[in-house]
Amino acid sequence: MRRLLAAVGLLAVLFVTRPAHACWDGWSATAGPIEIMQAGDETWSAVTARAFARWSARLEMVIPPGSVLRVVHGFVSIEGTGIEDLRWVGSDLENLFDLVVRAQHVTNVSGAMARDRTALTVQVFAAHDEKAAEALAEKIDERNRNETGPGLPGSFYDAGGYPAYHRIAHVLETKDAAGKPLYQVVVGAFLLRTDAEVARDVLAKSFGQRGFVRAL
C-alpha cells in the first residue's frame, strides 16, 4: 500500500506535466533536486541505480541553487531558469548531463565531474541456489505488501509498471571465488547510509531477515 500511494503521487505529476501519460512502464528516481521518470526500461537494474546515484550528484552541481531538474519521459525542465522541454533521448545519464550543461552554457564542469555518490542496499542472502534466492526475494516482497508495522525507507530508484507495487527485494547474480554463479538477495536502493541502516534494522526486527549494508 505504501508503494502504491507513492506511485499514485508520481502519477499525479504526469497529469500536469507534458507529455501526459496514464499507465506506463519504466523507471523513476529521485535525489534531492533531481527527479527522473523515464519510460522504456521496465526491469529493475542495479546498473541504472548506480549510474543515477553518480550522475545525479554531478547534475546537482550544474543547476542553480534552489532549482529542480525534472525529466518526464524525455522532456527536461529546470525550475526557475526558463529552461523547459529540452529533449533527452534514451537513458544514458551522461548524455543528460551534457544536455543540461549545454543548455545553461556551463563552461567549467571539472568540479561537477569530480563528484560521485555510491548507491547502497541491504544484502540478506547469498547462495549458489538461484531458486532459493528468488523464493526469499518473493517472500520479502509479499511480507512488505502486507506489512502494517514500521515500514522500510523508500528506495531512491524503482522500475516496473506505474502505478503499481514495486518490488523491494531483488536477486543479483555474481561469481564466487571459483567462478561459480552466486545469487545475492538485496533489499532497497538508498543514497543515505542512515536510510540503509534503518532498512537493515527493520528487516531484522519485522521481517526476520538479518543483513548488512553494502554498495549496490
Image (cartoon, grey):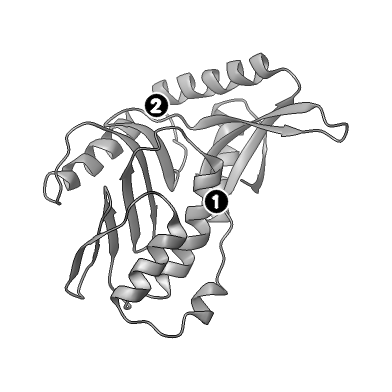
Check the image and name the residue furthest to the front: 89
Q: Position of residue 188 (x, y in %)?
A: 52, 39
Q: Is residue 114 above or below residue 90?
A: below
Residue at image location 55% in from the left, 30% down from the top: 170
SS label for mark 1: helix
- The residue drawn where x is 45% and y is 43% is 153
State the residue in front, 124 or 177: 177
- Label 2 to label 1: alpha-carbon separation: 30 Å
Q: Position of residue 154 (x, y in %)?
A: 42, 43
Quadrant where the N terminus sits is top left
- Front-lying residue, 122 or 88: 88
What is the three-letter code of the residue carrying label 1?
Answer: Arg
Query: What amino acid is at disc 2?
Result: Thr
Q: Residues within 10 Å of mark 2 (few under 14, many from 20)?
A: few
* Residue 52, x across and y down, in percent: 47, 54
Q: From the viewer's perspective, tell me whether residue 127 is left or right of residue 202.
A: right
Left or right of residue 185: residue 14? left
Against 107, is 178 above or below?
above
The residue that label 1 is drawn on is: 50
Q: Residue furthest left?
A: 16
Q: Secondary structure at mark 2?
A: loop
- Give the residue displayed 17% in from the left and 43% down from the top: 12
Residue 154 visible here: no
User: Residue 32 location, x and y as percent?
Assistant: 38, 62
Residue designated by label 2: 148
